[in-house]
Image (cartoon, helix red, strand yellow):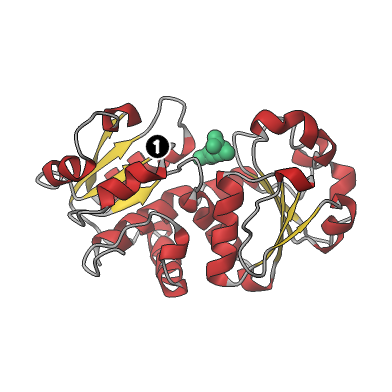
Amino acid sequence: MTSPTVRHLLRLTDWSADDVDEVFRLAATFEAGAGPRVDGCAVLFFPPSSLRTRVSFERGAALMGLQPVTFPPETLDKPEALADVAAYLAAWADVLVVRHHDPAVLAGLAAPDVLPVVNAMTADDHPCEVLSDLYALSRTADVRRLRFLFVGGDGNVARAWQGAAQLLGLDLVQCCPADLRTRDLPPGVRWTDDLADAVTRADVVLTDAPGEHAAVLAPSQVTADLLARAPEGVRLAPCPPFVRGREVSSDALASAAFVGHAFKASLLPVQQAVLAHCLTS
Ligand SMILES: NC(=O)NCCC[C@H](N)C(=O)O
């Protein structure tokens, strides 16, 4: 349970739909160059492999008045209690943005409620990524009326979409072989292994890197032929880093359905909005 005075973003299901609406409202103001200014310091933890989320958090923080100070996540892997780390950092920092594989590290930093902790990806969640895609979609559609098809097995991006579906009542189907599916799907989220059928009812097709399951997921590659079976106007938003010829084909990425590059531009205003929302609680 978090204190009412410190708002964290550890997982989307800790938030309310009103929080998401407020983040989208704030994101629109940041996009228009009129977002609130929040002077202070954001301490970020990112591995060297991070690209998009790190650039957009660092740039976004700087633009809104927060000085970004970035460390590798291993900085948090010392025997020192995470509550002590948070208590010391709170003297100079206003918010922590953390990418770390272990969600317990984020929970440990958040537990003393001395400053907000924002999840920039763990092994089992990625809320900012999904908020960004939903914001991009919300600019032209009512996301609650769209049908989402996640093509891929259990994982952090799958679970982030499932959390969003649970919170916002989204129509979401996971499509993958049975033994890769998420076991504890939230109420309302469905599973199928029939991709050719499921795509006929998909307005938004989502993917994630297959990790160690590339071979078994190869038949689930999203191709232009597959997308041709989808309703008109279908959008393909693969989670980067995607690989042509693995979870998506080159012709799918060259098709009009592909919105990936354009959608990720929203990481900047959405993450600024998340920071502002957490800092103004
Ligand atoms: N765009 C990103 O922030 N990357 C998401 C990578 C998700 C992938 N399942 C991973 O854990 O590396």
On whether ligand 1 comes within 8 Å of the CB at mark 1, the answer is no
Where is residue 6, by image quadrant? bottom left
Q: Nearer the viewer, residue 100 or 206?
A: 100
Location of ligand 1 given as a quarter of the image: top right
Q: What is the x, y in percent for residue 15? A: 41, 66
Tell me, yes or no, if residue 127 can be seen here. Answer: yes
- Residue at 67%, 64% in the rendered image: 189
Q: Nearer the viewer, residue 23 or 76?
A: 76
Left-right relation of 209 to 65: right
Of all residues, the one furthest to the top in this rendering is 48
Q: Is residue 25 above or below residue 130?
A: below
Q: What is the x, y in percent for residue 75? A: 27, 28
Q: What is the x, y in percent for residue 99? A: 39, 39
- Residue at 57%, 67% in the rendered image: 166
- Residue at 52%, 69% in the rendered image: 167
Left-right relation of 192 to 100: right
Tell me, yes or no, if residue 139 can be seen here. Answer: no
Where is residue 190, by image quadrant? bottom right
Where is residue 177, by image quadrant? top right
Regarding mark 1 in the picture, which secondary structure is present there? loop
Q: Is residue 167 above or below residue 107?
A: below
Left-right relation of 140 to 216: left
* Quadrant position of the N terminus in the picture: bottom left
* Quadrant position of the C terminus in the picture: bottom left
- The disc labelled 1 sits on which kind of residue? His
Residue at image mark 1:
100
- Residue at 32%, 63% in the rendered image: 277
Q: Residues within 10 Å of mark 1 (few under 14, many from 20)?
A: many
